[in-house]
Image (spheres, rainbow, N blue to C red):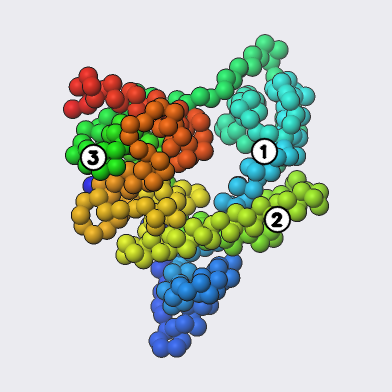
Amino acid sequence: MRKNWLRAGAVRWIGCAVAVAALAVGIGAAVLAASTVDPAFEPVVRRLVADGFSEAKLRRLFSRAEMVFSSRAMADKLTALYMRKYGLKLVADTQARLAGLGWYPGPVDGRLDRMTKWSIKAYQTAVGLAPRPEASQALLDELARTPRPAPADLVFPEFKTEEVHDVVLSPERLAEARDFYAANRKALARVRERYGVPEEYLVALLAVETRVGRYLGDEVAVINLSSLVAAEDPARVAQAFAYEGPAPDRQAWLDRKALEKGEWAYGELKALLKYADAQNMDPLSIPGSVYGAIGICQFMPSNAVKYAVDGNGDGKADLFETEDALASLGNILRAMGWKPPMTEEAMRKVFYGYNHSQVYVNTIMGAAARLRDDAASGKIK
């Protein structure tokens, strides 16, 4: 059952991109292709060529109109890392102004936590703005322009530590998971028999990752990964830290992190190109997450190359095809240590290896328990 993400609008640029109008003939073709590569991507292309990729193929790919550099993914990643380590001046200034007006109880630490987001939305709603829980220069300007005090009886919420992704365990999302389970019983059973992973755990993981294939990401994996590689040059993300004005030691830390993330992305970009070539896919037809995870099971490309397998016997390992995705998921979980019989602790360890988040693991275990009960009671037809 192929997921028609083109019709579903999984990638925002679909339908908007304009193809390259013409190609020159003979040796002029290479010159034209080179001239239309986004300058930010030219070093990426040269590096890939040096690593053995076909220059002709790369230039055809990178000269297509859709291949446009964006610093957003790297800027967002570095901003999150910097905020976690140091706190952001933009957030701290926002917190201070909100606190001065009674909208925020503290602390002023430069971290955009749930209380800060709640306070931003409360203020925005009060002054007639659409709630958008982000710190920005526009918000600071509005706070200066409209310094409306909070009502004296404002009650701040209490935020408990998140233990599961509640939305995944909602009736709607569990119904989606049950429908997927029912529609793919045979494929799920084959994976259980071959890899030892029970049906409910496979479905639960996919419910967390992609709503069992309903949401495959609204980015284009090759564009984002290429942009991350190009953005390891600190100058390409400098604007994101203009307000912060990092001290020299913090700027050096940012530079190191940009290089680290760029090197990681380069490995994933190479893997994505290899996977696309092996599966005869146009790289620009592959949607993904902001950091390049692809398919119904959201494999990073390096894992796609290692663990994607053919689940329906058509000779391909298409992670956007349900049977292939399920078989590939069973394959990677077995490689990560899934060997029945398993204790709950052992299962949790495997899922944590898939995604280093206890909330993620708790959610999978919770969804699997619900699905197991539903299957036993006949609720899954």
Q: Is residue 146 above or below residue 33?
A: above
Question: Label 1 is placed on what type of residue?
Answer: Arg
Give coordinates of residue 121: x percent, y percent.
60, 28
Could you say which quadrant of the image residue 318 lies in? bottom left
User: Mark 1 and mark 2: span between their CA atoms?
Assistant: 16 Å
Task: Give the residue drawn at x 41%, y 49%.
Answer: 299
Disc on the earlier residue, 1 or 2: 1
Residue type at the position of mark 2: Asp
Three-letter amino acid code at disc 3?
A: Glu
Of the numbered discs 3 and 2, the one sitting upstream in the chain is 3
Q: Are marks 3 and 2 in contact (CB under 8 Å)?
A: no
Q: Is residue 261 left or right of residue 142?
A: left
331 lies left or right of 84: left
Give the CA separation, mark 3 to mark 1.
43 Å
The residue singled out by tag 1 in the image is 84
Check disc 2 and report the residue beneath it.
Answer: 255
Q: Position of residue 351 (x, y in %)?
A: 43, 36
Q: Determine whether, in the image, residue 143 is placed left or right of residue 179.
A: right
Judging from the image, what secondary structure is the residue with disc 3 in?
helix
Position of residue 110 relative to residue 50, above or below, is above
Residue to which mark 3 is pinned: 193
Question: What percent of the width, then of the height, locates residue 156?
Answer: 64, 17
